[in-house]
Image (cartoon, grey):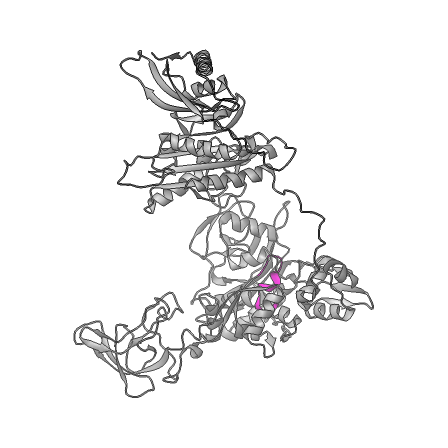
């Protein structure tokens, strides 16, 4: 919510300055997000007077102007604006001035051989407009040499506040002023709104046609003003709108926009000559659409409320009007609408159509129902004042709902809920200034809630109002009682695993990403999802329609965006939720990594010291096993099953990670070319995905202390074995068999060689294993070493059919 300081002062009397206003706003809960004070930025720009303008001797489209800036002799300025002419009052910038729109610092220059001692500025260059058709023309009576900013209202600070969704009353400047008046930095200016007497019956009537369905509007009022002269709105109104970033359109539209921000009362105006017959408020029908005022055509459905005439839909109720009945400079008769809408329906409609208008923003939060008719009278009075004309009587459908809510409020509630002891008088004063009706004596009060406060419904809400106005700083700080001991661990096992996984993957050179929890229907189906129960009822975008079954789609899209921007080698990871169904147990926590290009764990890109190779499945395998190792699993205990990975991985370059035949921990490998084509990305891409929920729970330990270090005073020894085995036997099976042969002494088994060719039978392969033995109690004798070696050979042969190579 934006407003200028002078705009606020139209509703708040008193001498509060900018600092006092902004400090008080934040103190009462309307947090100030930004203050734009352009007076200092534009102080160097002054009013100049063009005395003479001659054609540039060396350029047809340039002029050499003689400009008086009120100091000494006139200056020579070269200008290319088509509207530069003698007698014009303009904005002049001297050398050394910084242009707001570009940040360029002016210097004395020579343009096509003619010296130029400054610049004549356009509205776009000054940062006060997005369009520019030439230099800014100032009024003829603008004083030469004076700063131009005060002349056009740019010395007026603009305040932007954050309004929480429960405070729709502060989406108008008047409501903000009411809060400040309650904080006693001024008095609320609230002149009575006089009803405008209609001179004739309104020729256009309005009716509701909701049939047996739930009504989507409780009240709709309409009035005709005929004989108006529509054109540019007055300067004061244009300045108000421009100060908050709104573009003035014409007087009729500007009045409605002004009241939207001034009073929080959205209105709409129809060109009466473009309306056919009476207006009907109803649900949209299947197949109907509307070309709206923003130039877009919206497809409507039966869940949406519309305003229609005999020709069809003319407005999306409470969201946006139609272009066909919009007002322009040719409008002479105007219909002014002031209505109330179902807040939930407005929110659903705006979200379904992806339209976030100022009207929708207010209606979906709740406008003041009691101000519907006064707002119509206020708009009518402004239009009559600015555009002239004659107003009709008001015609209406429905009734304004009344909210007669009176709360029994013991003053002691403030102490009980907020820890602040206050007297009854301290409670009555701020509530009364906020518009509540308060009566009662002693400790027990009765409080009637005003129509513009839909967020107040009980005693706790009144306590909040009292405390925020009289000041949270009055609540005494009370320390929490000191506990007898330090509390235990607060993280769940899955949370601890997620933290470990993040640290491990980051240590391997991967960058954490946070992607959407939603993917497109096609992406969900590609990665094993797409179930009907996981489709969003109201997605924020067409390509974010389903809950993600995997983290890979988001990471793949992020890697491709990096590649499109010149960063082809990227390593990303994410730890987050995936969704396999709509039951609680179908929501899992996954740790997923992705590498692209040459982004290996040791680094990415080309290097003179080694050959550059693209990432492969073993890079993803290393990431997955490193994460599992830090999560407490021995990599040797993890089984890698080839050919069983999900379909989005390459069948020959991937593997499934298991603990036994039933516990699936995840998968790794190279992404299938078909998957890359479906996502519209290029490779090579390798990745892995671990389901942290699938990891076994850690065993309970009798103590949290680390176990004692178990070292050995004896030197380890290594023995090499070369086994001949069928080519389709995985090396991991040989390694596990060798480890199982002598678990107490075998501490490590490494694959150091793979050979096939002369000396090895066809269809066989030679795998070399280095087995490390670590004696614990004594040095092993040669006989003991030979016995252990024999057991290793026998165990490997039994498990895999391998034979020792001769």
The foreground one among 568 and 769 is 769
Coordinates of residue 145 in the picture (x, y in percent) = 36, 84
Q: Looking at this view, name the residue that lies furthest to the right.
A: 442
Tell me the quarter of the image containing the C terminus.
top left
Q: Is residue 241 left or right of residue 481?
A: left
In the rendered image of this protein, does residue 395 appear above or below residue 771?
Answer: below
Residue 742: image x %, image y %? 50, 18
Residue in the foreground of this view, choosing between 468 and 701: 701
Whether residue 243 is visible to the viewer of this picture, yes or no, is yes
Looking at the rendering, the stretch of residues picked out in magenta corresponds to: 163-175
Left or right of 382 in this view: 152:
left
- Counting the numbered discs, the total is 0
Up-down relation of residue 470 to residue 512 (above or below) = below
Q: Position of residue 535 (x, y in %)?
A: 52, 37
Task: Give the residue at x 17% y 76%.
Answer: 57
Q: Position of residue 607 (x, y in %)?
A: 28, 41
Query: Residue 461, located in which quarter of the rendered image?
Result: bottom right
In terms of depth relative to the viewer, which is nearer, 325 or 66? Answer: 66
Residue 402 placement, left or right of 777: right
Check the image and report above or below for 667 versus 760. Answer: below
Q: Is residue 170 magenta?
A: yes
Name of the residue lying farthest toward the bottom: 72
Is residue 375 in view?
Answer: no
Q: Is residue 546 magenta?
A: no
Q: Quadrant of the N terminus?
A: bottom right
């Amino acid at each position: 919510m934006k407003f200028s300081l002078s705009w606020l002062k139209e509703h708040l009397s008193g001498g509060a300055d900018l600092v006092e206003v902004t400090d008080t706003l934040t103190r009462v809960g309307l947090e100030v997000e930004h203050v734009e004070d352009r007076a200092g930025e534009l102080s160097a720009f002054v009013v100049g007077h063009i005395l003479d303008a001659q054609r540039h001797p060396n350029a047809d489209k340039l002029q050499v102007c003689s400009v008086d800036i009120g100091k000494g002799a006139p200056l020579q300025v070269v200008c290319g604006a088509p509207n530069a002419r003698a007698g014009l009052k303009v904005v002049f910038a001297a050398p050394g001035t910084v242009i707001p729109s570009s940040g360029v610092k002016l210097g004395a220059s020579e343009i096509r051989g003619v010296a130029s001692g400054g610049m004549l500025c356009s509205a776009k260059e000054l940062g006060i407009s997005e369009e520019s058709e030439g230099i800014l023309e100032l009024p003829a009576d603008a004083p030469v040499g004076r700063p131009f900013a005060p002349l056009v209202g740019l010395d007026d600070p603009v305040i932007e506040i954050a309004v929480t969704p429960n405070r729709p009353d502060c989406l108008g400047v008047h409501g903000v002023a009411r809060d400040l008046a309650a904080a006693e930095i001024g008095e609320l200016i609230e002149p009575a709104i006089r009803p405008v007497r209609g001179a004739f019956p309104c020729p256009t009537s309005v009716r509701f046609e909701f049939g047996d369905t739930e009504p989507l509007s409780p009240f709709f009022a309409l009035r005709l003003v005929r004989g108006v002269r529509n054109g540019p709105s007055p300067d004061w109104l244009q300045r108000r709108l421009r100060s908050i970033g709104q573009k003035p359109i014409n007087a009729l539209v500007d009045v409605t926009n002004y009241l939207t921000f001034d009073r929080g009362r959205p209105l709409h105006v129809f060109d009466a000559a473009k309306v056919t017959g009476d207006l009907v408020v109803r649900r949209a029908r299947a197949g109907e659409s509307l070309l709206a005022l923003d130039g877009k055509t919206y497809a409507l459905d039966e869940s949406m409320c519309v305003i229609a005439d005999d020709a069809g839909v003319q407005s999306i109720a409470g969201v946006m009007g139609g272009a066909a009945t919009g007002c322009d400079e040719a409008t002479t008769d105007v219909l002014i609408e002031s209505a109330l809408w179902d807040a939930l329906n407005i929110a659903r409609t705006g979200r379904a159509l992806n339209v976030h208008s100022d009207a929708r923003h207010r209606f979906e939060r709740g406008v003041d129902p009691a101000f519907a008719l006064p707002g119509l009278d206020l708009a009518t009075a402004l239009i009559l004042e600015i555009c002239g004309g004659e107003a009709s009587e008001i015609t209406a459908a429905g009734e304004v709902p009344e909210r007669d809510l009176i709360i029994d409020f013991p003053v002691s509630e403030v102490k009980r809920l907020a820890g602040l002891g206050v007297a009854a008088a301290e409670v009555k004063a701020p509530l009364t200034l906020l518009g509540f009706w308060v009566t009662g004596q002693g400790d027990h009060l009765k409080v009637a809630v005003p129509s513009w406060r839909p967020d107040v419904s009980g005693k706790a809400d009144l306590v909040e109002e009292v405390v925020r106005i009289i000041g949270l700083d009055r609540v005494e700080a009370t320390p929490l009682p000191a506990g007898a001991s330090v509390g235990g661990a607060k993280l769940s096992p899955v949370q601890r695993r997620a933290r470990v996984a993040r640290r491990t993957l980051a240590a391997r050179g991967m960058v954490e990403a946070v992607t959407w929890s939603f993917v497109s229907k096609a992406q969900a189906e590609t990665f094993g999802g797409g179930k009907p129960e996981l489709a969003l009822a109201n997605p924020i975008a067409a390509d974010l329609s389903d809950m993600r079954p995997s983290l890979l789609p988001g990471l793949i899209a992020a890697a491709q965006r990096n590649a499109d921007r010149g960063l082809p080698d990227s390593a990303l990871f994410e730890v987050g939720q995936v969704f396999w169904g709509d039951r609680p147990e179908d929501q899992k926590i996954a740790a997923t990594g992705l590498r692209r290009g040459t982004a290996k764990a040791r680094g990415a890109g080309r290097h003179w010291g080694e050959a550059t190779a693209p990432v492969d499945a073993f890079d993803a395998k290393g990431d997955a096993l490193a994460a599992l190792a830090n999560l407490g699993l021995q990599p040797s205990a993890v089984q890698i099953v080839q050919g069983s990975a999900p379909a989005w991985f390459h069948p020959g370059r991937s593997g499934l990670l298991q603990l036994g035949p039933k516990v699936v921990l995840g998968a790794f490998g190279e992404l299938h070319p078909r998957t890359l084509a479906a996502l519209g990305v290029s490779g090579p891409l390798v990745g892995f995905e671990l389901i942290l929920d699938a990891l076994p729970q850690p065993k309970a330990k009798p103590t949290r202390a680390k176990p004692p270090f178990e070292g050995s005073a004896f030197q380890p020894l290594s023995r090499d074995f070369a086994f001949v085995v069928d080519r389709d036997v995985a090396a991991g099976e040989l390694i596990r068999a060798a480890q199982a042969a002598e678990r107490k002494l075998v501490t490590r088994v490494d694959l150091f060689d793979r050979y096939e060719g002369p000396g090895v039978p066809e269809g066989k392969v030679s795998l070399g294993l280095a087995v490390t033995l670590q004696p614990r109690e004594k040095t092993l004798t040669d006989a003991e070493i030979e016995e252990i070696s024999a057991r290793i050979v026998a165990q490997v042969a039994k498990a895999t059919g391998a034979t020792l190579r001769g």
